[in-house]
């Protein structure tokens, strides 16, 4: 399950951030974390919600300060209480992951829903994921598709990739491989690794697009280079078995090990098939 954590929500809150907090964000983006902290702290202490969010971000990521989830949660919560949707999403992620608080999926759902109902795409994607896996709510693919669809309609690449899988499998929506291909492509072209991997699968299998092993390889590689373990496994298996491309066991082992280290079961099985002993 993919969740947008506080540290990943930066870009969305910038558009609504006052100029003085923008300076903190600009410093943060440049790696000038001490300067960002100096901008945000006095503003946060005055109750500026976006600066409170910024301090939460600083403490959650441990950039410029010692990483401190409880302190991050305090500042995120202050901003969330003022209605800042990205902060609500960030607090939800803290409860979902158990960062600074005990894991509480039901509480996470409440917060994600608050953000989603404001049209926050991160909240929409995360709420969709909670419905997919039945975390904090009964499993409901229709509701997952609804929230992913809202994020996708807003142009969010995560929402498009996650919705694509539902169209591919026919869960929560009528199965439509052509629509899945369209959504995966839109997500992939926006640089989303799950979208890139999904599009690779379609090209490898010839689903909704003409079968093309070279394009499958290309999209798998783009995704794997961003650290997606599923794509690294798919890439490694293509090299291992020479499916549509020349067999290359060195490349196969390189990518399969990357995936296996991230716990990908298919990669682990393929490495064992190749006779490699894993710890």
Image (tube, rainbow, N blue to C red):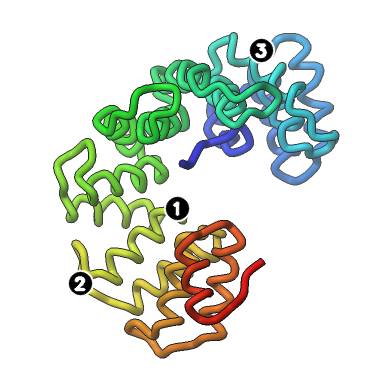
Residue 166 position, x and y percent, is: 27, 44
Please report contact status of discs 3 and 1: CB closer than 8 Å, yes or no: no
**Which part of the image, by quadrant, shows the C terminus?**
bottom right
Q: Which residue is mark 2?
A: 210
Q: Is residue 205 above or below residue 3?
A: below
Q: Which residue is mark 3?
A: 78
- Asked if residue 138 lies left or right of residue 61, the reply is left
- Compute the Cα span from label 3 to label 1: 31 Å
**Residue plotted at (37% across, 40% down):** 159
Residue 79 position, x and y percent, is: 63, 15
Q: Does the image show residue 24? A: no
Q: Which residue is mark 1?
A: 192
Assign a secondary structure to mark 1. Answer: loop
- Asked if residue 121 lies left or right of residue 168, the reply is right
- Compute the Cα span from label 2 to label 1: 22 Å
- Answer with mark 2 or mark 1, whichever residue precedes in sequence: 1
Numbered mark located on residue 218 in the image: none
**Badge 2, how many Cα within 10 Å: few under 14, some, many 20+?**
few
Residue 73 position, x and y percent, is: 69, 21
**Badge 3, how many Cα within 10 Å: few under 14, some, many 20+?**
many
């Amino acid at each position: 399950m993919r969740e947008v954590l506080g540290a990943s929500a930066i870009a969305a809150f910038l558009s609504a951030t006052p100029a003085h907090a923008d300076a903190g964000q600009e410093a943060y983006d440049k790696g000038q974390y001490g300067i960002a902290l100096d901008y945000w702290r006095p503003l946060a202490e005055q109750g500026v919600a976006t600066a409170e969010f910024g301090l939460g971000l600083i403490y959650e990521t441990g950039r410029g300060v010692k990483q401190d989830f409880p302190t991050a949660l305090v500042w995120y919560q202050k901003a969330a209480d003022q209605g800042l949707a990205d902060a609500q999403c960030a607090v939800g992620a803290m409860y979902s992951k158990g960062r600074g608080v005990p894991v509480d999926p039901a509480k996470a759902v409440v917060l994600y829903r608050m953000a989603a109902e404001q049209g926050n795409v991160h909240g929409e994607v995360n709420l969709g994921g909670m419905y997919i896996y039945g975390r904090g709510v009964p499993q409901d693919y229709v509701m997952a598709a609804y929230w992913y669809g809202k994020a996708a309609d807003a142009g969010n690449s995560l929402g498009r990739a996650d919705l694509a899988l539902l169209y591919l499998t026919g869960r929560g929506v009528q199965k439509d491989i052509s629509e899945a291909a369209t959504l995966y492509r839109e997500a992939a072209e926006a640089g989303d690794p799950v979208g890139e991997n999904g599009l690779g699968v379609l090209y490898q299998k010839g689903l909704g697009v003409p079968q093309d092993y070279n394009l499958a390889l290309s999209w798998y590689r783009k995704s794997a280079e961003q650290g997606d373990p599923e794509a690294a496994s798919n890439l490694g298996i293509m090299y291992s078995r020479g499916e549509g491309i020349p067999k290359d066991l060195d490349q196969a082992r390189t990518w399969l090990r990357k995936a296996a280290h991230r716990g990908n079961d298919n990669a682990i099985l393929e490495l064992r098939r190749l006779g490699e002993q894993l710890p």
